[in-house]
Image (cartoon, rainbow, N blue to C red):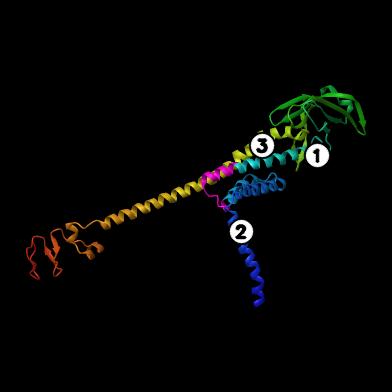
């Protein structure tokens, strides 16, 4: 038993020392940067491992508020100020992660749906570049019944969308048809310069009176192919901030954070109002108790007042024997005491 207590004592001292050091740390000016840094670090790992989760819009402001509160930052004005700074730091973290994500995307290939697609090998070349780069979009149309086919009846387009614009390019047939087994393949291309750093694309072909779409697929659902992405990270960062992280950091994170601060302010205000009401009631009670009794109150015994048993208005209590005496009596009918 003694050895068990002895082994636990060092751990208790370590815990006690850690608590003392933490209490000292909370009195230093470094507590706020540390709290913001921890919240930003947790946000970074959430972006890496929880991208697309609904929690990524709720947890960061809650974590930031909790850390600042734990660091004894409890004045609402300071909470709002440090919360705004914290959300700005998260904006920088989100922007850096998204820029790296966009520039590390693998090249995807678009095709039409089905096990035997007729639109295949839809790509853009190159996948990165800049405003002066000429990007070439190309896709192959496969047809299996040449005798009933007229190539002039095929109309192929590429839809290039950025975060703020949409371009519809008409593709042209290039080269001669290529025989590939039971198929005849036709290659279409469209070349253009692009001013937006972040883009995505998909192909659409009007064939035999109907439109066929060629895209990438995510979990079985069609999605646009991402690309091209500019190679300059600063160029990519600007639209990321403008269209994604600016909204996320201030209209989402800080809005939730400010609502929490508003709830704290309201609860404190309600508590102050309640305390003020109690103080006013106590003051009024003391004033009533300190007020000297009136002549009418003097004619009623204290016990009767406490029990709510007031006497008739035309009677009073004899000061000698304590019986009820008519209000107009000059002498007590019981003890004979004279009244003024």
Q: Residues within 10 Å of mark 1 (few under 14, many from 20)?
A: few
Q: How many marks?
A: 3
Check residue 21 in the rendering and tell me which mark sits there, or answer none.
2
Quarter containing the C terminus: bottom left
Residue on which the image places disc 1: 106
Would you say residue 183 sits in the magenta stretch?
no
Quarter containing the N terminus: bottom right
Residue on which the image places disc 3: 244
Q: CA distance from mark 2 to mark 3?
A: 40 Å
Give the percent coordinates (x, y) of residue 247: 63, 37
Q: In the rendered view, does 25 fall on the left or right side of 206?
A: left
Q: Earlier in the sequence, mark 3 or mark 1?
A: 1
Name the one closer to the observer, 277 or 305.
277
Vertical side of 299 occupied by 32: above or below: above
Residue depicted at 64% across the width and 70% down the height: 9
Q: CA distance from mark 1 to mark 2?
A: 48 Å
Q: Residues within 10 Å of mark 2 (few under 14, many from 20)?
A: few
> Can residue 120 be seen here?
no
Q: Earlier in the sequence, mark 2 or mark 3?
A: 2
Vertical side of 118 occupied by 330: above or below: below
Give the percent coordinates (x, y) of residue 77: 52, 44
Q: In the rendered view, does 302 fall on the left or right side of 27?
A: left
Q: Residues within 10 Å of mark 3 (few under 14, many from 20)?
A: some
Secondary structure at numbered mark 1: loop
Label 3 with label 1: CB-CB less than 8 Å: no
Q: Quadrant of residue 168?
A: top right
Residue depicted at 56% across the width and 42% down the height: 81
Residue range of the region highlighted in magenta in the rendering: 69-84
């Amino acid at each position: 038993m003694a050895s068990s207590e002895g082994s636990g004592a060092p751990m208790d001292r370590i815990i006690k020392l850690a608590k003392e050091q933490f209490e000292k740390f909370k009195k230093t000016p470094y507590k706020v940067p540390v709290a913001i840094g921890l919240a930003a670090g947790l946000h970074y790992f959430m972006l890496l491992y929880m991208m697309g989760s609904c929690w990524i819009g709720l947890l960061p402001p809650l974590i930031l508020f909790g850390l600042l509160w734990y660091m004894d930052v409890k004045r609402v004005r300071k909470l709002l100020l440090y919360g705004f700074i914290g959300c700005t730091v998260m904006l920088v973290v989100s922007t850096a992660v998204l820029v790296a994500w966009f520039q590390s995307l693998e090249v995807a290939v678009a095709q039409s749906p089905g096990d035997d697609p007729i639109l295949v090998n839809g790509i853009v070349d190159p996948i990165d570049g800049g405003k002066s780069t000429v990007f070439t979009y190309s896709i192959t149309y496969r047809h299996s019944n040449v005798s009933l086919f007229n190539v002039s009846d095929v109309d192929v387009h590429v839809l290039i969308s950025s975060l703020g614009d949409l371009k519809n390019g008409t593709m042209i047939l290039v080269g001669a048809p290529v025989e590939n087994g039971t198929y005849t393949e036709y290659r279409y291309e469209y070349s253009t310069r692009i001013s937006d750093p972040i883009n995505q694309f998909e192909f659409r072909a009007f064939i035999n009176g109907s439109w066929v779409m060629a895209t990438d697929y995510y979990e079985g659902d069609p999605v646009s192919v991402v690309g091209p992405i500019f190679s300059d990270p600063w160029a990519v960062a600007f639209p990321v901030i403008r269209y994604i992280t600016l909204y996320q950091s201030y209209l989402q994170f800080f809005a939730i954070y400010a609502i929490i601060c508003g709830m704290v302010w309201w609860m404190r205000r309600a508590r102050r109002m309640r305390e003020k009401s109690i103080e006013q009631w106590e003051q009024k009670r003391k004033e009533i108790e300190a007020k000297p009794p009136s002549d009418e109150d003097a004619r009623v015994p204290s016990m009767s007042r406490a029990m709510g048993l007031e006497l008739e208005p035309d009677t009073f209590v004899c000061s000698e024997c304590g019986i009820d005496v008519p209000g107009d009596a000059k002498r007590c009918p019981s003890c004979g005491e004279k009244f003024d």
